[in-house]
Amino acid sequence: GAGVSQSPRYKVAKRGQDVALRCDPISGHVSLFWYQQALGQGPEFLTYFQNEAQLDKSGLPSDRFFAERPEGSVSTLKIQRTQQEDSAVYLCASSLAGVFAEEYQETQYFGPGTRLLVL
Amino acid sequence: DAKTTQPPSMDCAEGRAANLPCNHSTISGNEYVYWYRQIHSQGPQYIIHGLKNNETNEMASLIITEDRKSSTLILPHATLRDTAVYYCIVRANTNAGKSTFGDGTTLTVKP
């Protein structure tokens, strides 16, 4: 079956430009996560959705970052007025269960990421 | 989530067992130990997880010490395709599922 897909795989933006990154989770997965991974570092949590509800956005670095999942499936991460420090790989992950299940042990399935380069 | 400490890099000969250590001395009772790996230019891939008992699946074994302050991921017969960055993550089952990755261990399997 299809895994998590992300598009575009690569994006080059000029500083100040707005970008939109798309994530298609595994069909039927309730939970969706966005992570940011700088070069040579591990992924860092940005935000989490359970269905269409954004339950945790504590990792978003600034108000230039906005994520949505309006119908509880596809999600878009939008970055406004991009800066050079936004250059990173943006990873999306999904899991079957909602994280407030009593015993959340769900495996998170990651997409290949979108590599964003801001010039 | 508890912080984890891993060696930055390790080498392993092809066909031999790779033993990757992880320290998580501040782990809490409700926190699980997860292992993921990331092959170059791909997203992280789940390997295994456990709470306090040792676990084994088709990919690896996870050995957790009795005090739960450290664990070891074992790849029993490493192949060149196992070359990757391996992340040890400690995650509570009630923290909305977000995973706190460190910098991981870069495992290089050599022929």
Image (spheres, rainbow, N blue to C red):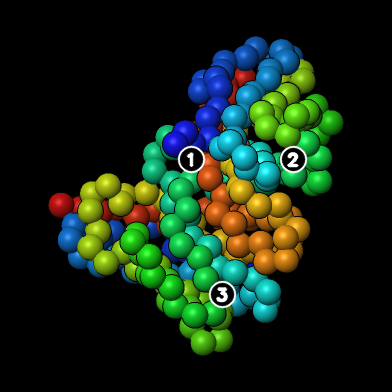
Residue beneath disc 1 = B43
Confirm whether residue B74 shows in the render: yes
Question: Share a chain, discs 1 and 2?
Answer: no
Residue beneath disc 2 = A51
Please rate how many residues cluster around mark 3, counting C-alpha atoms within 10 Å: few if below 14, some from 14 to 19, many from 20: some
Q: Nearer the viewer, mark 3 or mark 2?
A: 2
Residue sitting at x 59%, y 57%: A106
**SS type, badge 2:** loop
Above/below status of A10 relative to A45: above
Q: Tell me the chain of label 2.
A: A
Q: Quadrant of residue B4?
A: bottom right
Q: Label 3 to label 2, Cα distance in Å? A: 27 Å
Question: Where residue A109 sits in the image (x, y, percent)?
Answer: 53, 45
Which comes sooner in the sequence, label 3 or label 1? 1
Give the left or right position of residue A28, taking residue B49 as reference: right
- Pointer 3 and pointer 1: residues touching (CB < 8 Å)? no
- Pointer 1 and pointer 2: residues touching (CB < 8 Å)? no
Q: Quadrant of residue B54?
A: bottom left
Q: Label 3 to label 1, Cα distance in Å? A: 24 Å
Please rate how many residues cluster around mark 2, counting C-alpha atoms within 10 Å: few if below 14, some from 14 to 19, many from 20: many
Question: Where residue B60 sits in the image (x, y, percent)?
Answer: 36, 64
Q: Amino acid at mark 1?
A: Gly
Q: Quadrant of residue B33?
A: bottom right
Q: Amino acid at mark 3?
A: Leu
The residue lying furthest to the right in this view is: A63
Q: Which mark is residue B72?
A: none
Residue beneath disc 3 = B51
Q: Label 1 to label 2, Cα distance in Å? A: 22 Å
Q: Tell me the chain of label 3.
A: B
Q: Count up the numbered dots.
A: 3
Q: Tell me the chain of label 1.
A: B
**SS type, badge 3:** loop
